[in-house]
Image (cartoon, rainbow, N blue to C red):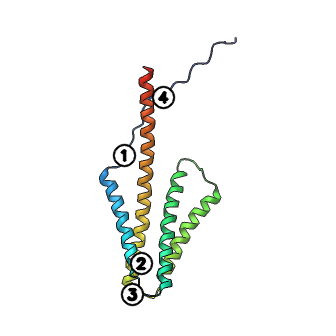
Amino acid sequence: MFNDAAPPAPVMQTALRTVRHDTRAWKLQVWASFGIAVSLAGIGLAWLPGEDLDRAFMFMGYLFTLSSAFALAKHVRDNEARRVDTPMWNLVVWSGFALAMGLTAWGLWRMGINPTYKAFLGVSWLFLVSSAFTLAKTLRDAHEAALADAVNAARSEHHARSE
């Protein structure tokens, strides 16, 4: 009725995960895109006509938007498979991004400058946000691929030793 034998040892899975790596061309495109977006936004802000206070407000808005875009990208990715952050942190991250976008858009809209210049600033700002999300995803993908490579290498080494 009772079995005094030890339970069987757990079976070690030795199947290697397929790891998808981004191409060097994609990484170059992402970094170039982000660099161009930062440059265009910086040029637009540096030559922004009008008051110094407007320039300072727009610089802070662009910086707030950029940092909140990276925070939001990380938050969404961290909580993709299962929720790891509290609901309050979720509210903080999403609210921060919404405020950054809203306040920067409001500052740009209310500025008394040439509409063509406003369009340049608006497009460079949206390009900056979009390229920040793409860069965040690319960096996170590279990190996860490196972790998967390390796990695969450890499994291969363990499998080679056990044979």
Closer to the N terminus: mark 4 or mark 1? 4
For label 1, the crowd category at 10 Å Cα-Cα, with few meaning under 14, some 14 to 19 and many 20 or more, is few
What label does residue 21 carry, if any?
1
Is residue 26 visible in the rendered structure shown here? yes
Which residue is drawn at the image coordinates 42% and 43% (left, top)?
146
Closer to the N terminus: mark 3 or mark 2? 2
State the SS at label 1.
loop
Rounded to the nearest angstrom, the CA distance separating label 3 from label 2 is 14 Å
Mark 4 is on which residue type? Answer: Gln
Is residue 110 visible in the rendered structure shown here? no
Where is mark 2, residue-wise?
A: 45
**Residue 59 in the image: x percent, y percent?**
47, 75
Rounded to the nearest angstrom, the CA distance separating label 4 from label 2 is 55 Å
Specify the quadrant of the image occupied by residue 148: top left
Rounded to the nearest angstrom, the CA distance separating label 4 from label 1 is 23 Å
State the SS at label 4.
loop
Q: Which mark is nearer the camera, 4 or 2?
A: 2
Q: Which mark is nearer the camera, 2 or 1?
A: 2
Specify the quadrant of the image occupied by residue 130: bottom left
Q: Residue furthest right?
A: 1
Q: Is residue 147 above or below residue 163?
A: below
Which residue is drawn at the image coordinates 34% and 54% (left, top)?
27
State the SS at label 3.
loop
Where is mark 3, residue-wise?
A: 114
Name the quadrant of the C terminus.
top left
